[in-house]
């Protein structure tokens, strides 16, 4: 974002407010009866500026968002897989658009940008991506979750079918935190796609100081993010589903200005998409993003599990799309090279599963 001022935001807000009253949802009201038949509202915007797109996506939901936040502190959780590869991580302009929106509704008094970067020091990544300028411009703190107080949760592991203790940031579990997942549209080498829910669940486990995925990693340092992945394609899908009741966004914003396809979340290639999705129902937001990416929702295990158990709305017929229409902005994202292997979550469990089934299980932690 080069030249984007609050005046631009306010002008956009006024125009967007008028436009929102004139735009029909993706599935027209005439086709599905009264507006009350929808169970979730998701905003979809497009444009040439990330900050503007994020601001406009949130603006039609301002009353509901302000009410949902109440007196809680607001945690903006970016998705920073790498501390030095911009395509893997949340763009600073997207965060700025959200902060400007929060300022417009009077909710920046207790706001934090918090992350546990997957590979490397979190605050170094914040510096590399320009996040510190946000602290100079807004009332916002930058926090490394690896330095936060911890709680313990237990997850499943395919290697031994036993629960394993995972250290998780207390802040992310605290009921006084209003969690905003600021994700990026990316394909994934374990669960087909990584969006708002996975950003929260896999970003919450902490790592020891000095941990990296390289030979320079500090001796003895470990990352509990590995445990959350369950040692297999079944394990990670189940853990994401099982943890969703404790760790989930209260507000999802998914930046698809430039997505990632192929061997994400680390080694994929860029997709110019120019979309942004936002909503208070994280599952509905992820469902819309999956559709925009041209991915068959039936193949995404953890989101199907969450849908089957009522964690949110995944039926497009029950989601009101505010703004743009999905069909006008679909792309067909190339999936990871191993996407067929990932679909093993659909198959019945066999006796072979007691053996290490995935000796080359890929390493990618958000």
Image (tube, grey):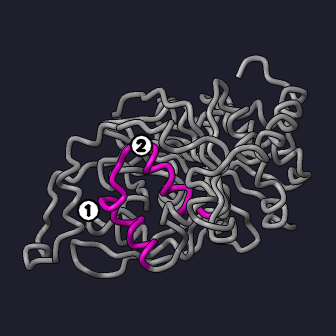
Percent position of residue 36, x then y: 69, 70
The answer to the question of whether label 2 and label 1 lie on touching residues, with beta carbons closer than 8 A, is no
Task: Give the mark nearest the N terminus, 2 or 1.
Answer: 1
Task: Identify the residue at horizontal 63%, vertical 65% (top origin).
Answer: 40
The kind of secondary structure the magenta stretch mainly shows is: helix
Q: Is residue 267 visible?
A: yes
Q: Residues within 10 Å of mark 1 (few under 14, many from 20)?
A: many
Query: Which residue is labeled 2 in the image?
Result: 293
Task: Report whether residue 147 is seen.
Answer: no
Q: Which mark is residue 349?
A: none
Please indicate whether residue 172 sits to the left or right of residue 211 in the image: right
Confirm whether the magenta stretch covers residue 303: yes
266 inside magenta stretch: no
Using the image, tell me which numbered label, if any, was put on residue 233. 1
Q: Residue at x 34, y 76 (%)?
A: 156
Instruction: Give above or below for 244 relative to 330.
Output: below
Please identify the quarter of the rendering in which residue 238 is found.
Answer: bottom left
Q: Which residues are magenta?
A: 281-308
Image: 119 above or below 63? above
């Amino acid at each position: 974002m080069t030249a984007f001022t609050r005046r631009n935001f306010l002008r956009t807000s006024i125009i967007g407010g008028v436009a929102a009253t004139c735009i029909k949802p993706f599935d027209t009201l005439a086709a599905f009866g009264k507006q009350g038949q929808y169970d979730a509202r998701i905003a979809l915007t497009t444009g040439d500026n990330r900050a503007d797109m994020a601001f406009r996506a949130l603006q039609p939901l301002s009353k509901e968002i302000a009410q949902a936040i109440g007196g809680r502190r607001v945690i903006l959780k970016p998705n920073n897989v790498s501390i030095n590869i911009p395509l893997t991580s949340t763009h600073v302009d997207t965060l700025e658009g959200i902060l400007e929106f929060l300022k417009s509704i009077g909710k920046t008094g207790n706001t934090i940008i918090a992350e546990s970067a997957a590979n490397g020091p979190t605050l170094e990544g914040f510096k590399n991506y320009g996040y510190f300028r946000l602290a100079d411009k807004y009332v916002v703190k930058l926090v490394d979750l690896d330095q936060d107080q911890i709680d313990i949760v237990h997850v499943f592991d395919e290697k031994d079918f036993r629960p394993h203790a995972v250290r998780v940031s207390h802040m992310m579990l605290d009921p006084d935190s209003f969690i905003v997942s600021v994700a990026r549209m990316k394909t994934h080498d374990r669960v087909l796609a990584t969006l708002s829910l996975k950003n929260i669940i896999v970003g919450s486990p902490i790592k020891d100081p000095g941990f990296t995925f390289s030979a320079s990693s500090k001796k003895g340092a470990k990352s509990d993010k590995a445990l959350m992945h369950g040692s297999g394609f079944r394990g990670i899908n189940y853990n994401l589903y099982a943890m969703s009741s404790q760790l989930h966004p209260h507000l999802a914003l998914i930046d698809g200005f430039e997505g990632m396809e192929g061997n994400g979340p680390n080694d994929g290639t860029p997709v110019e998409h120019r979309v942004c999705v936002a909503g208070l129902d994280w599952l509905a937001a992820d469902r819309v993003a999956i559709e925009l990416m041209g991915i068959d929702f039936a193949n995404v295990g953890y989101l199907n599990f969450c849908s089957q158990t009522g964690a949110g709305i995944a039926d497009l017929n029950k989601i009101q799309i505010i703004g743009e229409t999905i069909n006008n902005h679909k792309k067909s994202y190339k999936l990871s090279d191993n996407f067929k292997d990932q679909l093993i979550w659909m198959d019945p469990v066999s006796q072979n599963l007691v053996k290490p089934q995935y000796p080359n299980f890929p390493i990618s932690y958000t």
